Amino acid sequence: MSINAPSDIAANLQIGPTDAGMVRIYVEAEGGINLPLDFDPEEADEIAEELRAAAEAARAMGSKPAPKPKKR
């Protein structure tokens, strides 16, 4: 699956600190999937920067007019 492939899988996402000083991204999905992902604070900062950059890029894509379909 690629980043642009649509999916019908529903999931819940929780983000917070652990008592071990890590940042946990916890994904709970259909079918009993529970995926705890732990990152040290520096890695979490890098992920946050990537999220901000992706949000900015998505906003820029959303403001462009939709391309017209090609006639054949």
Image (spheres, rainbow, N blue to C red):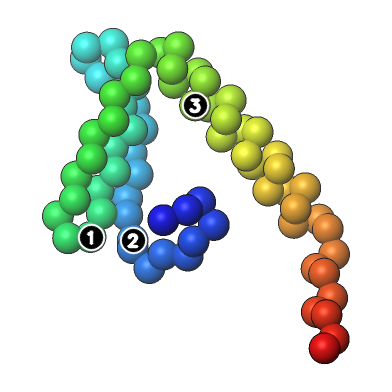
- Picture disc at residue 70: none
- Residue 11 quadrant: bottom left
Residue 8 pos. (x, y %): 38, 68
Q: Label 2, label 3: how many angstroms apart (C-alpha)?
A: 22 Å
Task: Tell me the element at label 2.
Answer: loop
Residue, disc 2 = 10
Q: Residue furthest front?
A: 72
Q: Label 1, label 2: how many angstroms apart (C-alpha)?
A: 6 Å
Q: Label 1, label 3: how many angstroms apart (C-alpha)?
A: 24 Å
Residue 62 vs 35, above or below: the answer is below
Q: Is residue 53 left or right of residue 12?
A: right
Residue at 41 percent across and 13 percent down: it is: 41
Q: Quadrant of the N terminus?
A: bottom left
Circle 1: residue type: Glu
Circle 3: residue type: Ile
Q: Is residue 48 left or right of residue 61?
A: left
Circle 2: residue type: Ala
Which one is earlier in the sequence, the residue at label 2 or at label 3? Answer: 2
Residue 44 pos. (x, y %): 44, 21
Residue, disc 3 = 47
Q: Residues within 10 Å of mark 1 (few under 14, many from 20)?
A: few
Residue at 35 percent across and 14 percent down: it is: 40
- Picture disc at residue 30: 1
Task: Tell me the element at label 1.
Answer: loop
Residue 61 vs 48, above or below: the answer is below
Asked if the residue at tag 2 contacts the one at tag 1, i.e. Cβ–Cβ closer than 8 Å, the answer is: yes
